[in-house]
Amino acid sequence: MEIFGVPTQALFGQLLIGLINGSFYALLSLGLAVIFGLLNIINFAHGAQYMLGAFTAFLLLNKAPALGLPALGYWWSLVLAPVIVGAIGVVIERLMLKQLYKLDHLYGLLLTFGLALIIEGVFRNEFGSSGQPYPIPEQLTGGQNLGFMFLPNYRAWVIVASLAICLSTWYLIERTKLGGYLRAATENPTLVQAFGINVPRMITLTYGLGVGLAALGGVMAAPIYQVSPQMGADLIIVVFAVVVIGGMGSILGSIVTGFGLGLVEGLTKVFYPEASNTVIFVIMAIVLMIKPAGLFGVQK
Amino acid sequence: MSAQASTPVAATPDSAIGPQRVAFVVMLAFFALAPLVIYPVFLMKVMCFALFACAFNLLIGFGGLLSFGHAMFLGTAGYVAAHAAKEWGWTPELALLAAAVVATVLGFGAGMIAIRRQGIYFSMITLALAQMIFFFYLQTPFTHGEDGIQAVPRGSLFGLVDLSTSATMYPFVMAVFFGGFLLIWRIVHSPFGQILKAIRENEARATSLGYDTDRYKLAAFVLSGGIAGLAGGTKALVFQLASLTDAHWSMSGEVVLMTLVGGLGTIFGPVVGAAVIVTMQNYLAQLGAWVTVVQGVIFVVCVLSFRRGVVGEIGNFMRKSL
């Protein structure tokens, strides 16, 4: 069977990869948007923290026995890695980022860029540049034959799980009281503080949450891509482009843009593979020419 | 940038020129005499990166625009100069001219897109555009992928002076560096430079005074790209190599670091910063990946407690704008 002269197997295979990539674009750009909303900084270390999540899973599985602990598998990591990496994020916010809020936003970008260099450099020294394999959890091995394509269970899980995480984050921020405080503090932190809400603590926890989301993405990515020190560095630049295209004003916007661009990238791989690396950047340039605030953004 | 707002950055341009002239003479004397004791190729590398950082600083220090994609100019110009010199047999001055022209055109194209957003969006867009250019060079055949363009001939200047030895190449690089530096110095102290600073301090007010700020920002971006291209072309001729390293995002990060260490928004800071970072890379080269970690630590320390940079601190101590 063929569609536009392309075998359906190849077409749907690439679309699936596109959806998987899109899941990670959505997860990461969501975290960036949440952090940006309240802290007004772009977290350049987001890719490094995603990598940190994947490595936490890898270490819990392979190195924990050396410390006398049981080897903790995928499901444990799914809970523990975001908590551990999120806690590191909280420490970073308290010790460093906090001092920069009164300065130009660019300093936050520079600081987190430095942190990303440190984290990635340390892991490259320890583990080298080559990737480390991470096994798919046994409950999710195998796959389904859908007739027109073969769908591995783990990949289906990643798409469903990341959609669920994105939508619950959206619900948390747009529909709960806590989210209401958060959005209010984004608009006017001084006023919210005057109502007796501890805004500095909220900022700290928000950064922790955003970082935790990145780490969660990292754990989910570990069995698909190999666990390597530079897995986050190249991804984060694409995610920046995704954020520029979607605009950071809306949570749903970043989810839709993330998945959408993943699909577009997958399609490009089928029809014009040479451009698959650059298609998102080209789309970014076009969007900026037509609608500078981004597809879902509001120009301030 | 707000941190600079408190320092007396050329509030009265004429009072700033005096100490800067002295510093310039010191710098000129240093680069003229240093090859007697320091390895000339190392000094040429410093001058290439110093010019690159000065070009970058024109944008961030005086226009308030943080470009995170300046490697695209360095890399592009390197490839153009190397290709022109090796494949077409152009003389070095023509190869360099071609490199600067192409980088300027690239600056116009990228600038048109990037200046449509401000602040951190600008940084993200320049980073993304540079990454796009990087992938283009990775795939297109004329760059020879991972190998780069190797064994680029330095050629003869105007077809007369053979540049293959350091004795002739060094004065040539020095002339390019000081030419570029003086151009930037002139731009900063020109009415155009004053308007750029006004835009940096308060864009809305500059607009209300009747300045089309987008045009000024674009002009600054184009100039910065062109001069960065000059640096990239020279670097390719000095090392007889144009490679992907120069176009990679980590190079964009390095130039930010150099400028930050030397002092954002100072005239001489980028030169000092480039010297510091290039020296450090030379001594730490055997440490491998730890260089990245050290650079990251310097970034963090500079941002947290050393935001004025070396030259900024000296200037602040002397109450002079350097």
Image: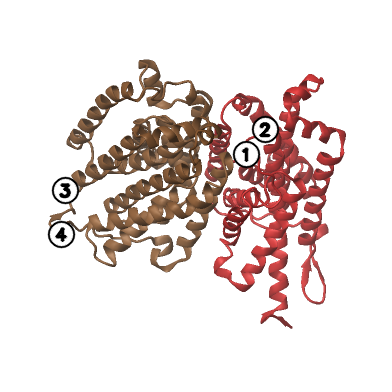
Chain colours: A red, B brown
From the image, tell me which residue sits under label 1.
A43
Q: Which quadrant of the view contains residue A9?
A: bottom right
Q: How far is mark 4 from mark 3, CA to CA?
A: 13 Å
Dot 1 alpha-carbon crowd within 10 angstroms: few under 14, some 14 to 19, many 20 or more: many
4 or 1: mark nearer the eye: 4
From the image, tell me which residue sits under label 3.
B168
Residue B190 in percent (x, y) is at: 34, 34
From the image, tell me which residue sits under label 2.
A39
Residue A118 in percent (x, y) is at: 54, 37
From the image, tell me which residue sits under label 4.
B159
In primary-sequence order, the first of circles 4 and 3 is: 4
- Quick check: A234 left or right of A192? left
Above or below, A75 relative to B142: above
User: Given contact means CB atoms under 8 Å apart, are the residues at marks 4 and 3 in contact?
Assistant: no
Q: How far is mark 4 from mark 2, CA to CA?
A: 58 Å
The residue sitting at 28% across, 53% down in the picture is B237
Tell me the SS state at disc 2.
helix
